[in-house]
Amino acid sequence: MSAAKSQIPLINDRQDSTVAISNMTPRNIQSRINALDWPRILASLHESGWARTGEVLTAQECDGLRALYSNDNLFRSRVVMARHRFGLGEYKYFAYPLPRLVADLRKSLYAQLAAVANDWESKLGGKSHYPETHQEFIKLCHTGGQTRPTPLMLRYESGGYNCLHQDLYGAVYFPLQTVFMLDRPELDFIGGEFVLVEQRPRAQSAAHVISPRQGEAVIFTTRWRPVQGSRGHYRVNIRHGVSTVTRGIRHTLGIVYHDAE
């Protein structure tokens, strides 16, 4: 993708955010997640392996989350992508305890997605069972030696991108994950679309290019999803990445439901 400068001006009209995201109550987040259009979201997940949620977080909440990036005390590690040939940009994994807003999003979304995970596992002939609550699922991760938290924040400046990959951190993993857009496309940054690539057996790969709005999330397949064939369901492998940011700065919050080794 070309990194040529766009003529679209970037608008920087935000005020400094002093929102205390710790004041967000679990009921507030849970009620917002429960109020999403889940019939549409679930239909999209089964049909395509990904879905947009519509707006979940307010602009002020997005600003508050983005401001956390400079507080190294909240994070267990920082990864500079170029050092590992992952792309160009960086990300930081939160440490436990997670910020309350991040923890509440993780728990509330998992509760809605566990049934999908079990349906996919059954269709693919797996033997795993995903508990109804995230607390129970994390116990399975910890029993398997996966104890490090995986929710993360990602930051890309102009020219930044993320190579196609999958977020697997051990034998135990959840088949779906979520990313929240914290900036305003076309205003705070240009480019930087979220990209999913499907690799179907004996067929050309298919790409999905997604541009979520600020405060909106994309729920997507972690590794593979079931697709109906003439002889039952088969596995479609999916990887995700980010196209080149041609101007501005792009921040996202990634919610991975399993912990890491």
Image (tube, helix red, strand yellow):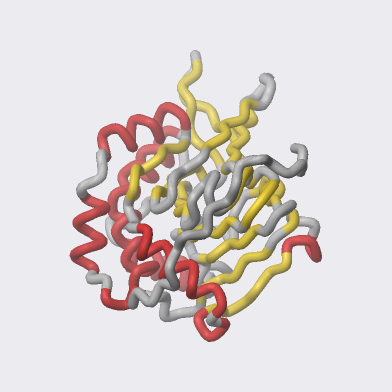
Residue 206: x %, y % from top left: 62, 26
Direction from residue 46 to residue 90 in the image, left or right:
right
Residue 176 is situated, as x and y percent measured from the top left of the image, at 46, 48
Q: Quadrant of residue 31?
A: bottom left
Residue at screen point 53% across, 66% down: 152
- Pinpoint residue 73: horizontal percent, then vertical percent: 53, 85
Quadrant of the image for the C terminus? bottom right
> Splitting the image into 4 quarters, where does residue 54 fall?
top left
Looking at the image, which residue is at 47% across and 57% down?
Answer: 182
In this orientation, which residue lies closer to the viewer: 52 or 237?
Answer: 52
| Numbered marks: total | 0
Camera-side residue: 1 or 94? 1
Residue that extends furthest to the bottom in the rendered view of this protein? 73
The vertical placement of 189 against 203, above or below, is below
Q: Position of residue 153 (x, y in %)?
A: 54, 65
Given the current orientation, which residue lies at the most extreme top position? 230
